[in-house]
Structure formats: structure tokens, C-alpha cells
Amino acid sequence: MVGITAPPTEALRDAGRPLFADGLHGARVEGHRARLRDAIAEIVPLQAAAEEQRRFPPEAIRILGDAGVFRERWKGGGHGDLGRSVILAEELGYAGLGGVGIGISLHLEAVTAILTRFARSEPAREALEAALDGRMIGCLATSEEHAGSDLTSIATQLAPAGSGYRLTGRKWFVSPGDAADFALVLCRRVESEGARRGRVAPLAVALVPRSGLVVERVLETVGMRSLGTARMTVDAEIGADALVAKPGVGLLAVTWGLTHERLAIAAQALGTARLALELAVARTARRRQFGAPLFEHQALRLRIADLAAQVEIARRGVHATAAELPTLPEGGLRSAAAAKVTATRLAARVQDEALHLFGGSGYVETETPLGRIWRDGRIGRLGAGSDEVMWELVAAGLQTGGEAYERLIAPAD
């Protein structure tokens, strides 16, 4: 795959066409993948220091912005080019970038998706342009102490103040909060008198610059240490033009961003699973036990084959979902949720088995990256909504009419 590039004339011809316009695979897709790998190769050296310092590296955003990756992804309006989204996420995972890769996806998918669809004011459009160029890093601040996946319980307040608003609250899991230049904050608009009586209005999304955000502390997360997840206090005076989504539209805006983020998480999880499998296959081919390479032991070889088959089918499912998302019911909300919960749970199994196949050395972080990959992967089942929330979204779309039941079973009741 590496080294396949489109000729200059072909690249110009294809510049405005969706990546999957001619199919989910082929020279054009692999040419784009190769170009992404060249850009990602510049980011890989940032990983070690980011992991050690628990700080997301802003340079990663600048590298991809300078390469035009973000603008290519959001060409065409609407959902943009989802093919470019999932291939980028997959390659970030395959490069083993962990938290750095997730931070890139949060900026590009959750934040930029919301701004692309809802930005109308000058400050919001300026933030979007800066985000696409890689000049500024955005984060999405939703979760609170008593409101994790339950976004309807948000307590952060947006109260009228002069010609604008005063925004106050605390956000608990903001990524990459330590490096962000601005945040899109999910909040509730309250009237001053009503706030004292506890009455709250619908949700809104406000654009808050760094000056209105205070990092209380960077959290000591088990994995994804290079993501820079922070607990933050929000205290800002903002103008009316800082509302990206007006009261009543906030949940819709965040859901739009999360739908794109979930699909990217699925792709990145499977990219990391491919990396873990590749390392495990190479290890078992080289490591000899009981007189033969481990790969020649049928029990181990078939376990790897089973996982590889599942990852391949899941990848194709994520690619197909990306190609079809704009035409799917509910804006692809349920399909993206299904992709995320399926991919992240599968990736967790793959990473666990790969670490196991490395034996004791897999558990030693100074010898292999399997330990870090293993602990990084666990957050996939929580971030952007837990497994249970994803299953509820899928369950909401299940048909209960029972046409097949009525046709095949009911007559015999």
C-alpha cells in the first residue's frame, strides 16, 4: 500500500470528488492512504514526549493542517468526505498514535463537524477556518461530574449579561483540554431570576476562547496519556455571536458532532487492531517454542485467523457506513453508534490477545508497545458514549412490528 501515489493530473482531477466515489478500495484510495502515511510519519516522533508529559502536542494539528488534510476532509459541505475521515482515523490507529490520534479526531470530527454545520457568526466562522488550517485546536466540553453520557443533565449555565452572556460551570473530561485554543461548551441558557429558582432552559453550544477556560488539572488517565484529558472550569463573558447553537439546538449540534466522532473512533480502533494483529503474527512467526515457531501451532494460528477475519469484516462495514452515512435514516446516528460499539469491543479483544501472544515481554512497556496499545484501547468503550448508550441508540431503531413474526409464527399461535 505504501508508495502508491496518484499522478499529478489524476490528483487534480480527483481533488473535488469523494474518496469513495469509485469504490471503497483501489489505487485512488490507497494513493490517498499513502499520502496520509507520509504526513502521519511526521507526527509519530511526537508520541513519546506527549505520553511522558501527558500533554497533547499542538504540532500534530499544525502538520495535518499544513498538509491540507483537514480541508480535504470537509470539502463538499454536509458530512464532508467521510471516506477521507475513516481512512485518516484508521491510519492514525495503525501508526499506534493512541491519544495523539484521538485528539486529532476530536478536533477534526467532533469540533469541526459542529462548526461546519452550525457556524453562522463571524467568531464561529473564524474559529472554523483556523481549525481547518491547523492554526487553532478545538475541543468539545460536554461531560460533567453528574452528567457523563447523559447529556440531558448538563448544569453549566449560560445567563444573560448585558448584550451577551455569562457562562459558568465545570467540565470533567475535556480532551485535548490542556492544548485547546477554544472549546465548544454544552450549556443551558437560564434567566437570572429563574436560575435562582432552579428553572433551566434548553441546551445551547457556546464558543469559548482559551481566556474563559481554566484547566484545574490534567487527569491521570490509565491510558491515552498523550491525549491531555483535563478537568476544566468555564467562566467567561461572551457575546451573543459566540452562540454556535442557540438554546434548544444544543443537543442536536452535539449529537451531530458525536456521530462523526463515533465513526472515526471505530475506524481508529480497527486501525490499532490491525497493528496489534500484525505485530502478533510477526512475533509468533519468529518466536520458537517446543521446537517450532509459535505460528505453526494450530491453536494459536487459528485464534489469530479468527480475529483477523472479524477485523477485516468490521473494517469493510465501517468503510461502507462512511460511504452511505449521508443517505441513512437519522443522519446515520444509529449506524455510527453500531460501528463504534462493535469496533471498540472487537479491538479490545484483539489487543488483549496480541499482548497475550507476546508472553511476558508483551507486559513490559520498555520492550514492546503492546502494553500501551492494550491500556489505550479501553477508553474506546466509554468515550463519545458508553457501550450501553450505543446499544440504546441501536435498540431505538429496531423494528417491533414483527412482519416476519406475523407471517411465520402468529398463524400457529
Image: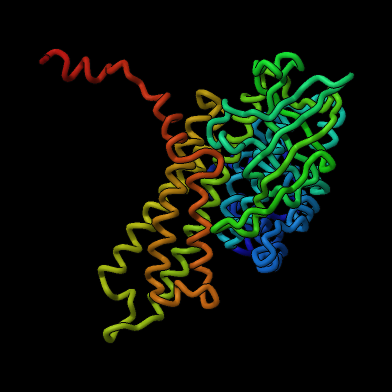
Q: Which residue is drawn at 84% across and 24% down?
A: 241
User: Which quadrant of the view contains residue 50?
Assistant: bottom right
Q: Is residue 312 visible?
A: yes
User: Could you tell me which quadrant the C terminus lies in?
Assistant: top left
User: Could you tell me which quadrant the N terminus lies in?
Assistant: bottom right
Which percent across, then down, holds residue 367? 52, 78
Q: Where 78 falls versus 344 (above or below)?
A: above
Q: Where 252 falls versus 305 (above or below)?
A: above
Looking at the rendered structure, the number of numbered marks drawn on it comes to 0
Which percent across, then down, holds residue 18? 64, 39
User: Which quadrant of the view contains residue 327?
Assistant: top right
Identify the coloring.
rainbow
Q: Is residue 118 left or right of residue 351?
A: right
Q: Which residue is drawn at 50% across and 37% down?
A: 321
Which percent across, then down, holds residue 49? 70, 67
Q: Is residue 212 left or right of residue 44?
A: right
Q: Is residue 122 left or right of residue 339?
A: right
Front-most of 71 and 175? 175
User: Which quadrant of the view contains residue 237?
Assistant: top right
Q: Which residue is drawn at 81% across and 27% down?
A: 166
Taking the view exactly as shown, the residue that stands out farthest to the front is 196
Which percent across, then down, holds residue 25? 53, 49
Q: Where 114 falls versus 5 (above or below)?
A: above
Front-most of 137 and 30? 137
Q: Where 226 falls versus 342 (above or below)?
A: below
Q: Is residue 10 visible?
A: no
Front-most of 106 and 6? 106
Taking the view exactly as shown, the residue that stands out farthest to the left is 412
Q: Which residue is drawn at 29% across and 64% down?
A: 302
